[in-house]
Image (tube, helix red, strand yellow):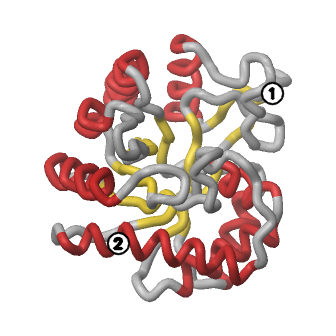
């Protein structure tokens, strides 16, 4: 499995994450497109880092919710959501083209990501938006028990998918992420590495009820918002290299 990480989330005078320290250890960067975080300078600088480290580029669009960091659900009409996505994707793709770089995929952020995994109507709208964008792009979604249905749905739009799993999150029996507000929703380092090991070697995670849930994941999401997280990414890389 290759590693992806949410980056480019600084804004103006505010620094979020340790992008320079994370980039050498990942394979793909999900770059904020300005609606929940990021700005033109941050986008450009993050893209420079992807070029230096030969990292795949993904657009990381959200609901228009900078005050809430894209973590609040919004009821948008389908066409409104499509326009929001096209606007953000186009912004990042344009900045990438200036540096001779190519956008590879789209991974929605925060509440939009959760909403599309919970509501098939929103997922269809997101798929329509990505598939109708003039450049060929893939969509990254959560690997769940519904993978087969999600793949079939994407085929109707002619849309390739990347399925991702999370290194540090506890799963429900259905393959959704346990809400961060619940106890033990985010793993400590030891449990996280155990989850990475079971995913990479045997293809399963242990759910909140102790069940084995088998998932087929192309990529593993990691987080790099502090120095401890960067060390965890290095540990994950070391673990994956020997499994």
Viewer-side residue, 124 vs 47 = 47
| Residue 147 position within the rendered picture, expressed as x and y whole percent measured from the top left | 70, 58
Quarter of the image that includes the N terminus: top left
Which mark sits nearer the N-terminus, 2 or 1?
2
Question: Is 71 left or right of 224, judged from the image as shown?
Answer: right
Viewer-side residue, 230 vs 141 = 230
> Residue at the spot x=64%, y=81% of the render?
128
Residue 184 to residue 44: above or below: above
Determine the image quadrant of residue 206: top right
Numbered badge on residue 202 = none
Callout 1: 10 Å neighbours few (<14), some, many (20+)?
few
Tell me, yes or no, if residue 243 can be seen here: no
Numbered badge on residue 93 = 2
Q: Residue furthest front?
A: 13
Alpha carbon distance from label 2 to label 1: 41 Å
Marks 2 and 1 close (CB-CB < 8 Å): no
Tell me, yes or no, if residue 66 can be seen here: yes
| Residue 193 position within the rendered picture, expressed as x and y whole percent measured from the top left | 51, 20
Question: Is 132 left or right of 28, judged from the image as shown?
Answer: right
Question: Is 203 left or right of 34, judged from the image as shown?
Answer: right
The residue under label 1 is 211
| Residue 6 position within the rendered picture, expressed as x and y whole percent measured from the top left | 45, 44
Question: Is 92 left or right of 178, judged from the image as shown?
Answer: left
Residue 130 to residue 225: above or below: below
Question: Helix or strand or loop: what does disc 2 sit on?
Answer: helix
Question: Helix or strand or loop: what does disc 1 sit on?
Answer: loop
Quarter of the image that includes the C terminus: top left
> Residue at the spot x=85%, y=24% of the render?
209
């Amino acid at each position: 499995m290759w590693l992806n990480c949410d980056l480019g989330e600084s804004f103006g005078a505010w620094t979020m994450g340790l992008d320079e320290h994370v980039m050498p250890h990942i394979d793909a960067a999900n770059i904020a497109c300005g609606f929940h975080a990021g700005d033109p300078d941050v986008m450009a600088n993050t893209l420079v880092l992807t070029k230096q480290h030969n990292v795949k580029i993904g657009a990381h669009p959200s609901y228009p919710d900078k005050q809430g960091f894209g973590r609040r659900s919004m009821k948008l009409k389908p066409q409104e959501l499509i326009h929001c996505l096209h606007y953000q994707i186009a912004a990042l793709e344009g900045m990438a083209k200036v540096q001779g770089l190519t956008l590879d995929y789209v991974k929605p952020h925060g509440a939009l990501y959760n909403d599309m995994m919970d509501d098939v109507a929103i997922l269809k709208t997101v798929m329509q938006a990505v598939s109708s964008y003039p450049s060929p792009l893939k969509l990254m979604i959560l690997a769940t028990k519904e993978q087969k249905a999600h793949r079939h749905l994407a085929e109707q739009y002619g849309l390739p998918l990347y399925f991702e799993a999370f290194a540090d999150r506890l799963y429900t029996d259905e393959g959704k992420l346990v809400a961060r507000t619940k106890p033990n929703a985010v793993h400590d380092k030891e449990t996280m590495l155990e989850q990475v090991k079971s995913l990479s070697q045997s293809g399963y995670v242990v759910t909140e009820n102790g069940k084995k849930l088998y998932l087929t994941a192309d990529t593993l999401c990691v987080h790099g918002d502090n120095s401890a997280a960067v060390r965890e990414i290095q540990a994950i890389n070391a673990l994956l290299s020997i499994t």
